[in-house]
Structures are given as structure tokens and as C-alpha cells.
Image (spheres, grey):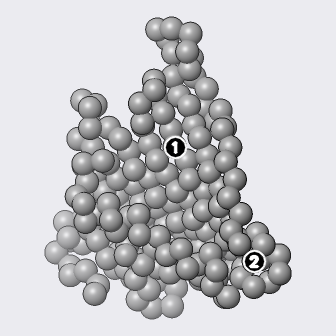
Amino acid sequence: MLHPTYQHLPLRSYRNTVGSSLAFCDYEFLVTNRILSAFHFAPRAELRASVRLFRGSLDMISVQYSSVVFKENSPIVYVQEDFCADRTDTTCNHFALNPHGRDVTPTWNGIVEFGELATEKEKRAAWALNLNCMTAFHGCNDISMLLPTIWKLTTPGAVSSRMRSSAHSIAESSQPLPE
């Protein structure tokens, strides 16, 4: 019932300054519930995965996941893992969330970006997308439904992050995380 497609998209085609080959190469994969939504069994949802190679090596993997339940501000989550362990300009153990903290907004847009040296617990939580949103009759209404291992709905219109972000302030770090 899901509709997968594959596309090779030259989203970024930079010339390698050393030779004539391309430095970046991007691939994109799209999965939608087009058939279910066409018959009104579920609101439209899509999962778009991207893989980026830099000079033939894996550079980044990302997933954009959305459940179109509203005309505006439909929930969307973006998860990105950076493969940068061999670089010297960054430590590659970052784990950043937006929004982060307690009782924060918006509840319709969430971003998780982390490096390959993040902890296994952080990686598992970031990639634990709730795929039931693809077939849910009413869809998913906020980011806590799309990625419940990262965000929890604490009040209508506000979420709290379930994990510490490298963007947390010292004050936020002393507060307990929601259950």
C-alpha cells in the first residue's frame, strides 16, 4: 500500500578542485502513502530519505518525515546523521535538538542532528520514527507523535525533549527530563 520511489538527484554537483569528478553526490528515496490517502483511509504522509556522498565516502544520511493533517503547520520531523569522525574541524559527537527544553513550541516542526560518534542511546532515539503515522486514520498531529522517543507532548501546543541536546543551556541541564 505504500508507494516507494527512487531518484538519483544531482542536488549539489560541485566540481572537485583536484580533478574533474564531482565532489558531492546526493541520492533521494521517497515513500508515501499515496494509495491510502487517495481513498481517504489516512491523511497524506511521506518519508523522504537522502544519502550524500563526498568524494566517494558517506557524508550524511537524513530523513524528512511528515504527516499532512493540517493545511498549514502539518507536523514534520527532520533527522540527520553526519559522518565526520575522520574530520579534524569537529568532534562529531554532537546531538542537537530543535525544539529542546521543557514546554517549548512549536510542536509541528522538529529537527534532530547528530554526529556518528553520538551515543548509541541517542542514535536509537533519533532513528525511532513512529511509522504508524503512515497508516493512522487521523494521521499524527505533532512532532511528539512522529518521533516519541525524542519529544513528549506536555500541554496542548507544547512539547518537552526527552533527551539532552548539546544545545541545552546550563539551566536546562539541571532540570529533570520528562518521563
Residue 90 in picture, x, y percent from top left: 27, 37
* 141 left or right of 93 in image: right
Looking at the rendering, in which quadrant would you find the C terminus?
A: bottom left
Which residue is pictured at 41% across the width and 30% down the height?
A: 57
The image shows residue 41 at horizontal and vertical percentages of 75, 85
Tell me the amino acid under the disc marked 1. Answer: Val
Residue 131 shows which numbered tag?
A: none
Residue 138: % across, % down: 66, 88
When the figure is inspected, residue 164 is found, relative to residue 7, above or below; the finding is below
The secondary element bearing badge 2 is classed as helix
- Residue 65 relative to residue 88: left or right: right
Residue at the far bottom: name it. Answer: 155
Q: Can residue 50 be seen in the rendering of this structure? A: yes
**How packed is label 1: few (under 14 Cα within 10 Å), some, or many (20 or more)?**
some
Q: Which residue is denoted by mark 1 in the rendering? A: 51
Position above or below: 67 against 21: below
- The local secondary structure at tag 1 comes to strand
Residue at x-position 38% and y-position 45%: 82
Residue identified by numbered label 2? 36
* In this rendering, the label closer to the viewer, 2 or 1: 2
Q: Residue at x 71, y 72 (%)?
A: 1
